[in-house]
Image (cartoon, rainbow, N blue to C red):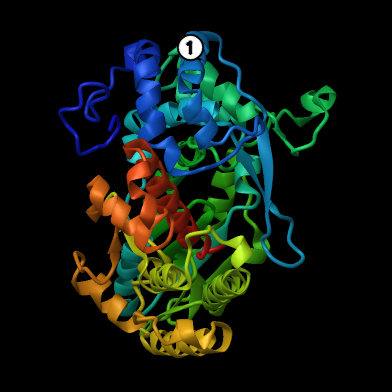
């Protein structure tokens, strides 16, 4: 793989080395035909996201020589396709979040830009897991007798970022013309509805803010707020920002002055506080942060986060009930026994989460900082009841259901546990075939008819669909 931090001997793009004076030359090198193909097969193919051109991973793969040549030859004068607009509900009476979906060609270019930005601004790459941050936060709160917690939400964060301020920050680090122009064109590029009229394209260009959903969005947002983060963190006892959610701990005597300081500092960079979602509370009070419900004695889970997870379980069970009842919707080889295997695998992943490329995925992994285990006992009971109520008895009787409680203890105390699915263990074609055929994703009687490339592709699609589903379970955590 090209960009893995661990691969210090990587000759294509060593993580520890970035020559700020040769970024444009390096950019063209990274976007050679050979490297583009490797980027697609190693990274882009993990997510089957379709942009405005309607080209999916399978179609791109079949015409990969054409696409890679086009990117490599036109990179000096590269034009992004309009991003496809995707609206994500934020709940009742709230405007939906607009996410920008690039084409696969654009995702490849944006991926390389992201990796260069990570190397130029390594201090702005926030790698510590949220559950680790929450545990550290609780340790501080539990030992602090006096003081205040200030919780701040930045209003319309991504949409309010001043592009000129951002670009000037980037120019302070490098004057690489191609690199900077590709970033500038990426953030002003229009996001359009699926059936927009091309004659209206100019009206969709974005001259304020940065689009959400691009590979470069998060790192650009962190670069934009880096000076603010450094300034405010030096003024308080504890400071943590996750995107637009800020939490800090300060002394009671300076809470008002600090709040005014934050407000003015944000105003200087065209941002403002969302008063409706901002609170100043005593350190002994209970508060909600990033889906967690926290006080001095307890780390629990916000009720809405629990309900979102339960709803996703019900949706999965009803989907499989429909698939069981309507055999015409299944692949011809998907017997009831194979369907049972798939259901069991998917339900247990809902419980335990999974690991892939040493990264942790899933609801329980995210909330593994809790010490309120009563929730997990309740979840076991809710899941068992739902399975018996929704699925047919001949399926239910055969399912070996895992436990939230056991999975929690394995996550906390046994990180290499075999109890939790680890996709990295499927490291041979034989293992991938066994995984796919056991769950009915390929015809067991025709295993020899599949090429190695087809098995690799099908396995990657199943894996990434499962991981994406686990990420969707988290929903909005603000």
Horizontal side of residue 105 vs 155, given as left or right: left
Residue 220 seen: yes
Say if residue 423 shows up in the picture.
Answer: no
* Residue pointed to by mark 1: 177
Secondary structure, mark 1, is helix
Please identify the quarter of the rendering in which residue 349 is found.
bottom left
For the residue carrying disc 1, how many other residues have a C-alpha within 10 Å: few (<14), some (14-19), or many (20+)? Answer: few
Place of residue 263 in the rendered image (x, y in percent of width and height, measured from the top left): 58, 52
Looking at the rendered structure, the number of numbered marks drawn on it comes to 1
Location of residue 413 with respect to 96 vertically, above or below: below
74 is higher (above) or lower (below) than 309:
above
The residue at 67%/28% (across/down) is 82
Q: Residue at x 37, y 42 (%)?
A: 450
Q: In front here: 140 or 340?
A: 340
Q: Residue at x 32, y 30 (%)?
A: 119
- Please state the horizontal and vertical placement of residue 132, each as a whole percent of the image: 31, 63
Q: Is residue 164 left or right of residue 432?
A: right
């Amino acid at each position: 793989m090209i960009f893995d931090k661990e691969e210090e001997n990587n000759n294509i793009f060593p993580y520890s080395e970035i020559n700020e004076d040769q970024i444009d030359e390096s950019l063209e090198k990274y976007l050679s035909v050979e490297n583009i193909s490797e980027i697609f097969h190693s990274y882009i193919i993990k997510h089957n996201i379709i942009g405005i051109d309607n080209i999916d991973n399978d179609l791109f793969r079949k015409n990969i020589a054409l696409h890679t040549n086009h990117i490599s030859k036109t990179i000096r004068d590269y034009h992004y396709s309009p991003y496809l607009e995707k609206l994500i509900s934020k709940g009742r009476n709230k405007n939906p979040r607009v996410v920008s979906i690039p084409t696969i060609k654009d995702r490849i270019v944006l991926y390389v830009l992201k990796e260069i930005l990570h190397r130029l601004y390594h201090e702005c790459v926030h790698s510590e897991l949220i559950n680790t941050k929450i545990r550290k936060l609780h340790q501080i709160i539990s030992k602090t007798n006096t003081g205040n917690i200030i919780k701040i939400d930045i209003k319309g964060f991504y949409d309010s970022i001043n592009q000129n301020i951002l670009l000037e920050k980037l120019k302070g680090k490098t004057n690489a013309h191609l690199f900077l122009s590709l970033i500038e064109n990426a953030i002003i590029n229009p996001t359009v509805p699926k059936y927009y009229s091309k004659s209206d394209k100019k009206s969709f260009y974005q001259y304020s803010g940065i689009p959400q959903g691009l590979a470069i969005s998060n790192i650009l947002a962190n670069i934009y707020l880096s000076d603010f983060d450094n300034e405010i963190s030096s003024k308080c006892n504890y400071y943590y920002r996750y995107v637009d959610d800020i939490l800090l701990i300060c002394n009671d005597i300076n809470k008002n002055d600090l709040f005014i300081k934050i407000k003015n500092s944000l105003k200087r960079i065209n941002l403002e506080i969302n008063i409706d979602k901002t609170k100043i509370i005593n350190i002994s009070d209970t508060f909600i942060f990033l889906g967690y419900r926290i006080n001095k004695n307890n780390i629990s889970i916000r009720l809405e986060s629990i309900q979102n997870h339960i709803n996703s379980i019900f949706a999965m069970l009803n989907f499989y009930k429909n698939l069981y009842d309507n055999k015409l919707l299944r692949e011809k080889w998907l017997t009831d026994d194979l369907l049972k295997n798939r259901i069991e695998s998917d339900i247990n992943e809902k419980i335990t989460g999974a690991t892939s490329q040493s990264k942790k995925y899933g609801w329980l992994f995210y909330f593994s900082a809790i010490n309120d285990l009563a929730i997990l006992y309740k979840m076991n009971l809710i899941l068992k009841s739902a399975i018996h109520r929704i699925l047919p008895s001949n399926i239910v009787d055969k399912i070996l259901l895992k436990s939230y409680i056991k999975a929690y203890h394995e996550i906390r105390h046994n990180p290499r546990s075999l109890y939790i699915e680890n996709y990295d263990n499927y490291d041979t074609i034989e293992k991938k075939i066994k995984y796919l055929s056991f769950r009915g994703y390929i015809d067991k009687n025709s295993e020899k008819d599949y090429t190695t490339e087809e098995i690799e592709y099908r396995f990657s699609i199943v894996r990434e669909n499962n991981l994406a589903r686990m990420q969707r379970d988290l929903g909005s955590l603000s």
